[in-house]
Amino acid sequence: MNRRVELKNHQREIYYFRLRLVLSLIFVLVMLFLLLTRFVYLQAIRHSHYQTLAENNRISIVPIVPNRGLILDRNGVVLAHNYSGYTLEITPSKVNDMEAVIDELAKLVDIQPKDRKRFKKLLVESKNFESLPIRSRLSDEEVARFAAQRYRFPGIEIKARLFREYPFHEQTSHLIGYIGRINESEIQQLENTEDAANYRGSDYIGKTGVEQSYENELHGTTGIEQVEVDAGARGVRVLSRTPPVSGNSLVLTLDAKLQEVAEKSFGNYRGALIAIDPNNGEILAFVSKPGYDPNLFIDGIDEQSWSELNDSPDVPLNNRALRGQYPPGSTIKPFMALAALYYNKRTPSYTISDPGYYTLPGSSHQYRDWKKGGHGSVDLFKSIVVSCDTYYYGLATELGIDNIHSFLSQFGFGKKTGIDMEGEVSGLVPSQEWKQKRYNQKWYAGDTVSVGIGQGYNLVTPLQLAYFTATLANDGVAYHPHLVREIKSSKTGESTSLGTEPEFDLNLNREHLALVKRAMVAVTQPGGTAAQAGAGAPYEIAGKTGTAQVIGMKQGEKYIESQVLERHRDHAWFIAFAPAQQPRIALTVLVENGGHGSSTAAPIARKVLDYYLLGKIPKPLPVVDEAGVEND
Amino acid sequence: MIRRRLWQRFILHLDPILMAELGLLMLISLIVLYSASDGNWGRVGGQLTNMLVAFCVLWLMANMPLHYLMRTALPVYVLGVVLLIAVALFGEISHGARRWLDIGMTTIQPSELLKIAVPLMMAWYFEKHEATLTLKNYFIATLLLLVPVFLIARQPDLGTTMLIAASGFYVLFLAGLSWRVMLALLIAALASAPMLWSVLHDYQRQRIRTLIDPMQDALGHGYHTIQATIAMGSGGIFGKGYLNGTQSHLDFLPERTTDFIFAVYSEEFGLFGNLILLGLYLMVIVRGFVITANASTYFTRLMAGSITLTFFTYTFVNMGMVSGILPVVGVPLPLISYGGTSLVTLMMGFGILMSIHTHQKLVKT
């Protein structure tokens, strides 16, 4: 009985067991089917989606930054070039404790406080995932030291790249300008242009000077590499490659040696010098003193150097040649003389008797000549040679402001020259209309009087004045002043010369021109205001001195140079072209607070002319500054 | 003649069908490992050695008479639990979990032993009380399961905990636990889920959260899942071809020779390959069920059933995890993933399965 029950139970048990086993199998099949559904979903239904994801994972488009074009002077001297070197770069998003990491790095690589400051500034300006340089131009030894310890520094790497370098440092700073890291506003500007794609991967852009104005030529075309990457974003294999095209090189009109001579001739003076070939508008020298070292700006300038430059009373960052506006002073006289001849207000033989001052009809106000007691009997020729103010007071008054404005405007006064550099200012040639607009005042006769000698409302930049001088030298045929002569294509190696078509012809009377030019030659000869500077020159120099007042003199007050603060001294001008008959060079020199044009500006011009025309390198120039300390 | 006899003796307790199926899976393992390790023969050789060791274990288990096996149930179980307690007290911490025990020569992971010891113990216990099974016996068997499960859960080791809990549950289920009790347990489990959530470690919770939305932590915890699904999905129907998986060869797939090897296989052989693999696993499971169905004693039925179902659980959990429908728990793909320990444990199970099948055949004849 007992046994039977047990057997019965046993069979029931087997039955139930097998039932549960079948249920288990069904469970297994259902679950495996569930898996299969998931597989079908992933691999058949969503296949293309995941394929794209895998491709994106795998392929990374890497822009290859092109080499920036070189900048050469007219004789092939390199003014801006690239050299390869190493930077130490940090990707901020991969570093937790930046300070600690930099401290650690400093044990391997020399990191100065100014490097840290510069880096912090970069950090604020940039996006988190970019890698930013903390040190550039690592020495081989530093590279080796870091490489050995690299594993300790995730997110930090050494990158080989090309560095921009300006071998002439300060000497070419204001004309070459510099490149620097692309900032936020430049990114936004680029976004709106067709160039946006071309700047993917570029860290640098031209900021000032030729680097800026010829950015499109210099930058080149960015290449593209399709790289298969692994999960660490390291490139494993290049799938396809469109090589970058290097930027085109620029051949400047500049003569580097001349630039050097000009720059050095200034000694410690501040000022500007522009030399132009009057036959085609090529700028041979472009000096703005003081300059600055453009190399400092490339990777972001450190705070200390920046404040030194920015807070200096000499404002070295100001491009005086391009953006400095000064009254032309007596340098305007040759142009005034041409205007008077043009409008028949003066004949060559018309002579005045100069008592040393000028009074407007019906007024007792005396407009003084620079020479007490006057120049005696003065005709047009002499008025230029001795720079007679009285002559031009009357001349201007008779010409009237409308004629003056119209004639000078034709020359280009009050207009930008259109030089191939950004940031130019236009100067000012006053008119009745202008004064009404600007000051809401009518034009007074007295205003015209001071305009006659280049004071008052007149303003020119050194560049403008050089351009006018060149036009004058070239008998009224003007050429656009420009800095770039040729663009050398990096692709074909061919050079494209930039056109030197005349801009306009003033159609001036030959005799008038000859007279004014002759007078200007006499300026540099015994009896002229720049006789000293012209002494012994084996070629004829046509020149004109000028003085731009910095502070106004009260009626009856005497200007005594030694008693005026250095910064309040007059600016000295000198314009010249030579050889006078067949001018090959026209130039303008401005010496800030240099006093009289004859004493400071003209000698500088002479040195530049001597070098350019005779190949004469000025004697080591122990330039003596105001304090009598020798400088080089 | 002698050689032939020796051979026959050698294969006497081996189940040819199961052997063929296991052999095929292990062959696939070597093929995929070669690709997953970027052509590193060292890995393949290492796994081959593991396989040989595991086969020896299988052969020994297959040849061990069942009453010996039953006799080991209690001591092995006790030893396992003692070792687990020792781990809890003196274990080595690695990757934030206390799982290993240093026994001088080497470190061992006692939880692995429990994968066999727990169902063995429970099956033995049910066999012993077969005649007079009451609810009390189920309760005691459940306790036998919960003690090691609790110890392993607090190591913590979510994957092993789940597998052992499952193997124990299969024994209970096959032993005839009434549906009503199971329903009650299910309700209790669901009710305690919020409490369980609060007991979980932060990283475990994170894994479950990640399962729901892998993108919320794409480079952290979700990374494994995202990259694995990309690998599978981009494989498509026919796969990218052997050795051509970009996800795996370019290092996007983590742990691709061990827990995530299925993604490598799936990327290179596609849906088609998955079907074949699923088919192979199903065949192993079906063979296990056949052996279970034919097992003659209570003990062997429970043991064989539990081993088979646990094997399935391994497979499902791993594939589910790789394809992104289960949270990431450290469960290797049985017989395919690189690693000796799990392979030995699995083969030990299959050895027992074969022993169950062949020894009773002998008894019958």
Image (cartoon, coloured by chain):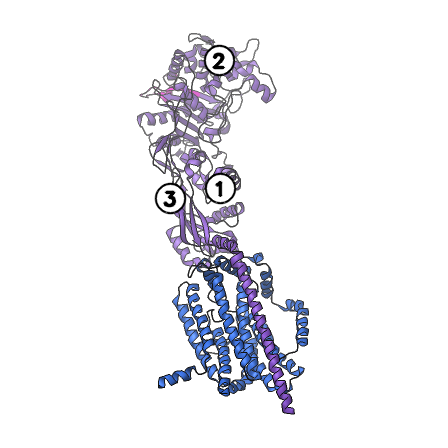
Chain colours: A purple, B blue
For marks 1 and 3, give the CA distance. Answer: 20 Å
Residue position for label 3 = A83
Chain letter behind tag 3: A
Would residue A390 be counted in the magenta stretch?
A: no
Label 2 SS:
helix
What secondary structure predominates along the stretch shown in magenta?
Answer: loop
- Residue B77 vs A400, above or below: the answer is below
Q: Position of residue A511 (x, y in %)?
A: 39, 11
Placement of the N terminus of chain B among the 4 image quadrants: bottom left
Extreme residue in the bottom direction: A1
Mark toward the start of the polypeptide (2 vs 1): 1
Q: For the magenta stretch, what is the residue range?
A: A526-545
Residue B130 found in image quarter: bottom right
Q: Give the label on residue A182, or none.
A: 1
Q: Nearer the viewer, residue A308 or A594?
A: A308
For marks 2 and 3, give the CA distance. Answer: 59 Å
Residue position for label 2 = A390
